[in-house]
Amino acid sequence: MKTNYKKPALSLGQIINMSIGFLGIQFGFALQNGNASRILQTFGADVEHLSLFWLVAPITGMLIQPIIGHYSDRTWTRLGRRRPYILFGALFTSIALLFMPDAGILANFLPPIAIGAGMLMIMDASINITMEPFRALVGDKLRDEQRATGFSVQTFLIGIGAVVGSWLPYVLAEYMGVSKTAPNGVVPDNVIYSFYTGAAILLTTVIWTVVTTKEYSPKELEAYAEAEGQQPEVEEKKGLLAIVDDFRLMPQAMKQLGLVQFFSWFALFSMWVFTTPAIAVHIYGVVPGDSSSAAFADAGNWVGILFGIYNGTSALYALLLPRLARQFGRKQTHAFSLIAGGVGLISIYFMNSPTMLIWSMVGVGMAWGSILSMPYAILSGSLPAKKMGVYMGIFNFFITFPQIVNGFFGGYIVKYAFGGQAIFALVMAGVFMFLGAISVLRVRE
């Protein structure tokens, strides 16, 4: 029976407090995206093998997020059901941020490349543990009519954290005199200190969210779900076996969004893995395989600036998305944004100076802002409240699977189809963005 016991509308300040931890998570994530390939190449990785190292991220996400979602739906502690996982994941992400660029200090035990890859694995697993409960927390706390705003605020804070995280190595090197070069096989100080800063900011912001945000009890959530017209659910299977049933019974809109996510995240993975080597060779004229020259360092630092620009664009664009979605529709808004991202990625091939790449990143930022919010806004209204966590985790499958496919085949495509020229991986990514835009128009909300 439908009641009037609805969730209270949250103020903008409460929504920001609930999401501020995402700023810290994205700070660390931006450092990883902008510098992981650079660090791994410093430790001896070849360009065609980079995508294989990056496989750690989607594989851990695919395995961990549905499990974390399943158990966070069923957890209740003094901290609630989402916050324990958020706090635990943030702690281990911070540890990985401290050790990844300094892997050389453990070289007596394992080769630096193995330690660096291991820290990348821990960082990705921990970020996944933290990120999924954050997504579910928005669904738990907000009314349906506030969820687009909630995910847009989250995207705005993600953008702020990513801008600062992406720009920090460049700022330390160019404006604070921290060394940007190092002997062969050693990560420069500006990158190391950036990772230390990221660890501190990530942990601080997540603790802020945990302290300032109160979760609803299971009984309150059940009453709110009833007020929203959702039927009570009967749990027929216990344990992880229930995830299989949840996957099989996922809403139709979620299945249709899966194809959109495949094209979008295949493109993003290519961009994160290959932008540094592509721009180093295509724009800065670095000899392929050179990872210790000043030109390579300049290229890596400038990629951080570019990634900050696309994240900053996404933060501002996120503020417009709710209005655009109301006026033109969520599907049409997302399609337009993905087209802008495709144009931005393909345009990199035609640029001939580092500063011109800024315009390319504006388009990418529009796509990124929409990817982080519109699919979740489309999806969240069709998810049962008691399974918000597990379905948000299962939805991550459609994010991780395309990255795994790209991880296995992307490097070989670059080596054998593109003759080792990473720039064409970015052109291919742009084409995939266009395919995502076509696919989203076929989704039935």
Image: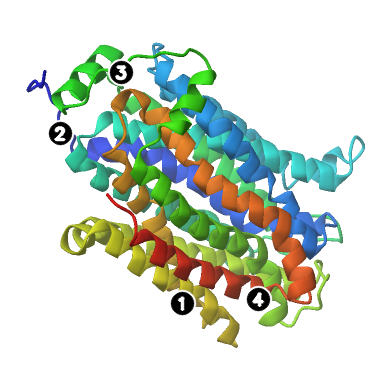
Q: Are marks 2 and 1 in contact (CB under 8 Å)?
A: no
Give the number of the disc on residue 314: none
Q: Nearer the viewer, residue 290 or 419?
A: 419
Residue at the spot 40% in from the left edge and 50% down from the top edge:
256
Give the number of the disc on residue 9: 2
Q: Is residue 311 above or below residue 55?
A: below
Q: Nearer the viewer, residue 122 or 167?
A: 122
Secondary element under disc 2, as helix, strand or loop, is loop
Mark 1 neighbour class, 10 Å CA radius: few under 14, some 14 to 19, many 20 or more: many
Front tag of 2 and 1:
1
Ranked by sequence position, the earlier of labels 4 and 1 is 1
Q: Nearer the viewer, residue 137 or 333?
A: 333
Ranked by sequence position, the earlier of labels 4 and 3 is 3
Secondary element under disc 3, as helix, strand or loop, is loop
Ranked by sequence position, the earlier of labels 3 and 1 is 3
For disc 4, the marked residue is: 424
- What is the spatial separation of the Cα atoms under label 4 and label 1, in whole angstroms? 14 Å
Residue at the spot 27% in from the left edge and 59% down from the top edge:
321
- What is the spatial separation of the Cα atoms under label 2 and label 1, in whole angstroms? 39 Å
Front tag of 2 and 3:
3
For disc 1, the marked residue is: 343
Q: Are marks 4 and 1 in contact (CB under 8 Å)?
A: no
For disc 3, the marked residue is: 233
